[in-house]
Amino acid sequence: MNQADAKTSNPCTENASLGHILLADDDQQTCTAMSYVLRHLGFEVTTVNNGRDLIKLAMQSTYDLAMIDVRMPVLDGMTTLAALKRNPTTSDLPVILMSKYTSAEVSSKSKALGAADILTKGDLKLEDLKTKIVSALGYESREVETPQSKLPASHEEAVTQSPAAQMGQTDPWTQAASSIAACTSAETRAAVEISHLYLIFEQIKQEISKLGNDQARQCVRLVEMDPGAMGCVLQYVNPAWKIRINAGMEIIISVRKAVEALGVETVRKIILNMPTRPDDPVTHPWMIHWWRHAIATAHLASAIGPSVGIDADEARVMGLLHDIGRLQLINSEIGHSVIRTYDVARNVVLPITACEQIMLGVDHLELGAEFCETHGLPESVSMACITHELTNALRHRLSEEDALRSAMLCACDQIANASGFYSLPGIDLRPLPAEAHTFLAPVQAQIENALAQAQADMHWWLGQNAPAMFHAKVDITGINVVLITSHNNHWNPYRQTLSLAGGHVTSFPHLQKISDHVTRPDVVVIDQTATSVHSDVEHLQLIAQRFESIPILLLAQRSDEADMLIEQKHWKMHLYDSPIRANSLLQAIRKLTANPNGGQQS
């Protein structure tokens, strides 16, 4: 790295830097994301990719703080820390270590060596990061504010300048760097609290005003098509729901029962009195994108829910409102900043929810649950908001009933994403829950029908006015793919993504299941995102030997350090570690099949 090019500064804070941070991380994309956030906290940042270069710069210039990754080539973080503290020139430099996982042993060792603190990468909110840095610098008595960027003055200017309107360009980081605002959790919550539940489609008011009082079925259908309408109706029919529970009263969790209880006339009044959403050409395409995902997830949940003992009507509500926190973020007065955050998030190697925590101070899962409680929505909807992205390990901490509900909704969420109904462009693809194969197998036909119904809804409501997709689909037509995955079913998100892009996909649960007569693949994709590569070394070794002359793409957990295993075993594999994004996965396959000896994907 050219050190002259490494130094960067924030235009918003160039004249009033809070300090100069020396940042070391061998993962360039993670390093870019972290330095980006630090600049927006008001710091000047210089980056290097190993401990040796950091020590050299620390001895040549004056810095206020060093932030060092624990695991790096050339010189790791602990060794670098020890060297800095032994040298009289750098011994007073405060150091914060960064690690993927922070154990008690690592924390203890870092403190013993003189680290001011240690943080876990990808699992730290903006305010917590700022607190750790301020403490390490000794600024506790000094108020440190996060610089705020101004929003565009007009919608026309927003369309011109927003990175969302400039997708497809090669350097979205440069586009976003001068405009994105990193909000604190207090600012984000304040903006969401005063936002309204708007109708996605104003024509619902026209349609519902035509209904007679005896047309309850048509009324239910209209309300179920719009998350804002559904939220308002359920809020109205369940006032003070905690009091209702304590009094032994029924909590209404289906639109059908809500319309029966209120009557068509009352529901009509609720819908007609809902506020009109301001016309905003920046947020509107993202909201429509979100709506498509919500509708598809609702249809899937209604089809799959009964197989795990959840009423179809209740499951539909959970599916439609599971991402209500993200809708409220986009709808709020900081909506432009939220859009810019998502536009940047799709280009960094962090899950989008983690980017929300870093850039906005809080994620949509937490906001959704808080919104449900504040607005009196049923507890099952709140649980859907907070648990639909849980991993298998975290899901097992829930009660058996809640874990099953979470697994069902997670499966619906991922099937919708993998079938092209993305909630956001560049959304992360995740493995299906471990329990999914048991409750998906009996309802294959219902799932196909649910997706067809969702597509019909898109045409009914959007017609020719549907906004263009954010990305053109990457085409892999004619490419033969062998997918080896422990989740070997039709609805595996990676299989769905590859198939929808035109690939000829044959999937197997294990190498031994692959017939000698299978068509010679152009590329082999190994899905290890649900299990550790270290628990399956022998199987991976056999795959590497069987397909020695064919490009192999290994999908793995980022925390698994699969790159070190590949290097140690001398496997001819190309690593793609999480988060897995649909278009970039397809682009990686295109690149590998065009140039089988191409560089490693990361």
Image (cartoon, grey):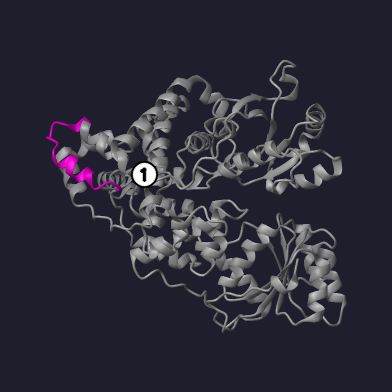
271 is higher (above) or lower (below) than 315: below
| Residue designated by label 1 | 378
Direction front: furthest residue = 594
Whether residue 215 sits left or right of residue 460 in the image: it is left
Which residue is located at x 79 percent, y 71 percent?
54
Query: For the residue labelled by badge 1, is the local secondary structure a helix, a strand or a loop?
Result: loop
Amino acid carrying label 1: it is Pro
Quadrant location of the N terminus?
bottom right
Whether residue 256 sits left or right of residue 65 in the image: it is left
Where is residue 131? Give x, y as percent.
60, 71
506 is higher (above) or lower (below) than 230: above
Q: Which residue is nearer to you in this view: 451 or 219?
A: 451
Where is residue 521? Give x, y as percent.
69, 26
Q: Could you say which quadrant of the image residue 455 lies in?
A: top left
Where is residue 513? Give x, y as percent.
72, 19
Q: Is residue 549 magenta?
A: no
Magenta extent? 200-217
